[in-house]
Image (cartoon, grey):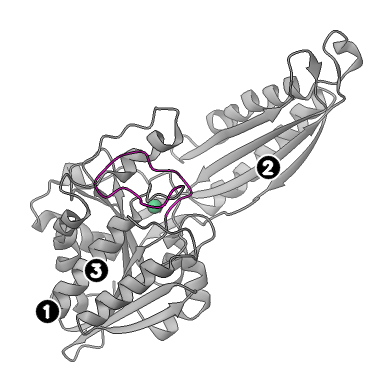
Amino acid sequence: MHPELQFEEHRTSAVVAKELTRHGIEVTPGIAGTGVVGTIRNGTSRRSIGIRADMDALPIHETTNLPYASKTPGKMHACGHDGHTTILLGLARKLAAEKNFDGTVHLIFQPAEEDISGAKRMIEEGLFERFPCDGVFALHNLPGQPVGQVTVRPGAITACVDIVNVFIRGVGGHGALPHLAVDPIVAASGVVMALQSIVARNLDPLDPAVITVGAFNAGSMATAIPAESHLQIGVRTCTENVRALMKKRITEVIAGQAKSFGCEAEIQYGHGYSYPPGHNAPGLAAAVREVALELGQKPADIDIKGPYMFSEDFAYMQQTVPGCFLGMGNGAPAVFTTPATTSTTACWRKPPPSGPSSWRRCCPVHETLVSPARIERATY
Ligand SMILES: [Zn+2]
C-alpha cells in the first residue's frame, strides 16, 4: 500500500526493522542504504543460510482498485515485491517463535532490484562477509500458476538482459523528394527485421535467447523524412557464451543493415542496467524440489524445462555464494496482452484473493527449507 522506488525504501525498511525487532531478531539496517538483514541463530551448528526478499516498487500508477492498492500516486508494487517482503517477515516471525532449527538464518531484505541492483551494492558493502551463507535462496511470485506452486530447475534459471541503444542516422528531407534524402526509418525497419534472423540462424536451437525491439522512435509528421531513428533493444540470454555471440552478431547486423541503406549506426551496447545470467546450484535446487514434493506438489508442476527469460539481480548473489532462485505461483492469470502499462503488469500484482497477508501461505516452502536437516546439508 506504500510502495517506494529503488533505494528510497525508507518507510518499508523501517517497517521491516521494526517487525524484526518486535520478534526479538537481531537487526542490521543500512546495508546498501535501505537494506536490512535480520539474523536468527539457534543451536550449535555453524551452518548458515540466507533468504532474500526484494522491497522496491515501480514508477507505475496503480489502477487496480485492489483493497491493498498503492496509496502513492505513480508508484506501484507491480512486480509483487511487497508480497516477497511479507513472506519473509512471516517466516521471521515463525522462526523466531518456534526456533526449531539448528544453525543461522540470515533474512536479507534487499532494496532496488528493478534497475540498479541493490543486490550488487549489498555484496559490495560486505553482505556475505558480514553474514556468511553456505547457501542463499530467493523466490519470485509468478502469474499463471496456482498459489504456492514451486517451479525450479538446476543450472540456468534467469536471463541476462543487455539493453542496446541504437541511433541510425541518415539525411532528412521532404517526403515528396525521397531520392534526395537518406531515410533512417526504412533503414531502422530493415534492422528490426534482420535482427530476428540472429536467434533463428546464428544460435544453437537448444540455447535460449530473445531479442526484443521494445522502442522505435523517429520523425514527427507524415510528410517529412527525419534525419534519425532511435531503437531500444532488450537482449536476453542465459550464458556468457551466448551473451557474447549475441553482442557480436547484433552489432554486425545493425552496422551492415544501416550501411546498406546509406545510413550510419551508433550502437551503445550494454546501455543502462545489465544483470548477469542466474545459475542455480544443483544441490540447492534439489533441496527446493524436495521441499515442494513434501508439500504435495507434483514433479510435472515443479520441474521447468528451461530458465525464465526475465532477469533478476539475485544472479549477483548466486555469483558470490551458491544460490537457488525459485518461482512461486501467485494465482493470477498469465496475461500480458493488454496495451496499457498498468494492465500489462497487473497480473504480477495479484496476490491470493484475501490479500497480501495470505502470502504467508507460501511460508511452508521457506519453513521447510530452514528445517534442521537442510541447514546441516547446506554445503551443497
Ligand atoms: Zn520482481
Q: Residues within 10 Å of mark 2 (few under 14, many from 20)?
A: some
Query: Residue 97 bears which disc, if any?
Result: 1
Identify the residue at image location x=57%, y=34%.
214
Instruction: Give the residue type at disc 2.
Output: Asn
Does the magenta segment cover residue 72?
A: yes
Q: Give the residue type at disc 1.
A: Ala
Q: Residues within 10 Å of mark 3 (few under 14, many from 20)?
A: many
Q: Which residue: 36% across, 73% down? A: 14
Name the residue located 83 percent from the left edge and 27 percent from the top edge: 227
In the displayed structure, 303 sits above or below 94; it is: above
Q: Position of residue 110 (x, y in %)?
A: 40, 67
Numbered badge on residue 165: 2
From the viewer's perspective, tell me whether residue 340 is left or right of residue 256: left
Disc marking residue 89:
3
Q: Are marks 2 and 3 in contact (CB under 8 Å)?
A: no
Q: Which residues are magenta?
A: 57-73
Q: Gap in Å between the C-alphas at discs 2 and 1? A: 51 Å
Task: Please tell me whether residue 380 is drawn above or below residue 165 in the rendered image.
Answer: below
Residue furthest to the top in view is: 176
Answer whether residue 98 is magenta in the image: no
Residue 248, how many percent across, how many down? 67, 43
Q: Secondary structure at mark 1?
A: helix
